[in-house]
Amino acid sequence: MADGDRLSDDMPVASATGEGSTLFGHPRGLTVLFLTQMWAEFSYFGLQAMLVYYMTGDLGFSQTKSSLIYGTYGATAFLSPFFGGIIADRWLGRAKSVIAGGALMMAGHFAMAFEPLLFPALALVAIGNGLFIPPLAVQVGSLYRDGDPRQAQGFSAYYMGINLGGLSAPLICGSLGEMLGWHWGFAAAGIGMAIGLVIYTRYLSLLPPEPARPNASAPGDPKVLSAIDWRNLRILGVLIVTIILFRVAYEQSGNVIALWVEHQTDRTVSLFGGMEVPATWFQSINPALIIILTPFLMRHWQRRNKGDSLAVLFGRMSVGCLISSLSMAVMIGGAIAYASAGQPVSMIWVLGYFVMLTLGELFVIPVGLSLIGRLSPVQIAAMLMGAWYLAKFVGSMLAGIMGAYWGVIPATVFFGIGMAALLLAAAILAIMSRVHAD
């Protein structure tokens, strides 16, 4: 089938059969989407790992200004998928939206090499991200027929691609930026996005065809929602609030924690002749731990065989927030140690922070996404998935505002606020678990 036919607006809904599969018995299109997303995440997280250092270093921005810009950019990147999904569903179609979004992100990364283009470049990446993410994720599910048990495994593989990109980006882009200059790092991120686009466009024929799109002037009528649908919407509203609280603390990992690593952490490794670990490398810890820990957690939950009732899922998320709160407790300990020593402290504090944060994340984010999928009424499912990104948007904005007070308030108080947000989310989720217990 020609690419032009693949992008046709009138293509009917269809699913891949999985015949001729090449990745652990899955449709060949999964390999395409896996690699496309991996390179997109490489470019996105490559820029994120360098952004604060670039602004406070080369551009001479204050820490307060840099934190606000970082938070606003991250929040916009989380807000844009809500609108990008609508555009893909009603106007562009999935493939065209992915290509347009990837092209915008690639242009934004290359534009970062020019200092006067900082804000236009960040805008291009944020807008492109919105067009790119929703339709690509939807295409993963469309590779399988309804009821195909391989679908969940396919999403697990797709999620692995996300984290492989996030793992390699700080190591490659960050190293180039710190050793050769930030512009080299941004260029590497742009090249990564270009590779992803080449893979995607080269193998469009392996992807599921475009579904028929609804008339843009006839959105779903909320009056057709049932009483159960409205109950589910109320549950999702509470879920969104807890995700905002989680994100307020979580998003400091690339903002204030990055500054802590640079200024308050002793990054010298004596085993390698006193080598100083590049600060950007620490941003690879989170995705590396996700890749390592996910299979163990999946086997653990399968062995417990408690099912996936609402009570169990909310309880699991509550435990995740409690675990994540320990990451802030670790940083409170690190802040006390730094104040006492008056000099950079051991990397153990930051490593402990990332271990607790990541373990908690694995209990919160995947489970939250599954709840969105389970409870969303079909008429407004895309809108509610967009609400998930809206929660990330609000949380990132609040995290950026909070980060602006780094250095103004004591570090112990700063991390204590993050811990309080996570404990509040854990309490709300625990209550939800009890309310929905059988």
Image (spheres, helix red, strand yellow):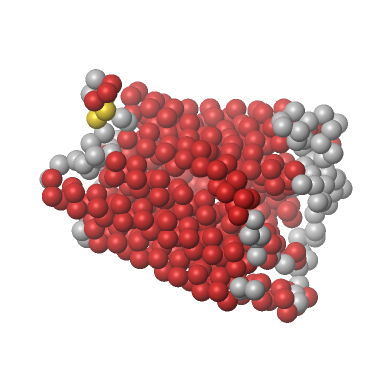
Q: Is residue 387 left or right of residue 46?
A: right
x, y percent for residue 166: 50, 37
For the point 71% across and 31% down, which residue is it? Answer: 23
For the point 47% across and 27% down, which residue is it? Answer: 188
Q: Quadrant of residue 271?
A: top left
Decide if residue 57 is in sight here. Answer: yes
User: Is residue 143 or residue 79 the one in the foreground?
Assistant: 143
Q: Is residue 35 left or right of residue 116?
A: right
> Looking at the picture, does residue 213 appear above or below residue 197?
below
User: Is residue 353 or residue 162 the one in the foreground?
Assistant: 353
Task: Quarter of the image for the N terminus: give it.
Answer: top right
Task: Quarter of the image for the C terminus: give it.
Answer: bottom right
For the point 60% across and 68% down, which residue is it? Answer: 311
> Looking at the picture, does residue 427 appear above or below residue 62?
below
User: Is residue 210 or residue 316 the one in the foreground?
Assistant: 316
Decide if residue 396 is in sight here. Answer: no
> Looking at the picture, does residue 50 appear above or below residue 176?
below
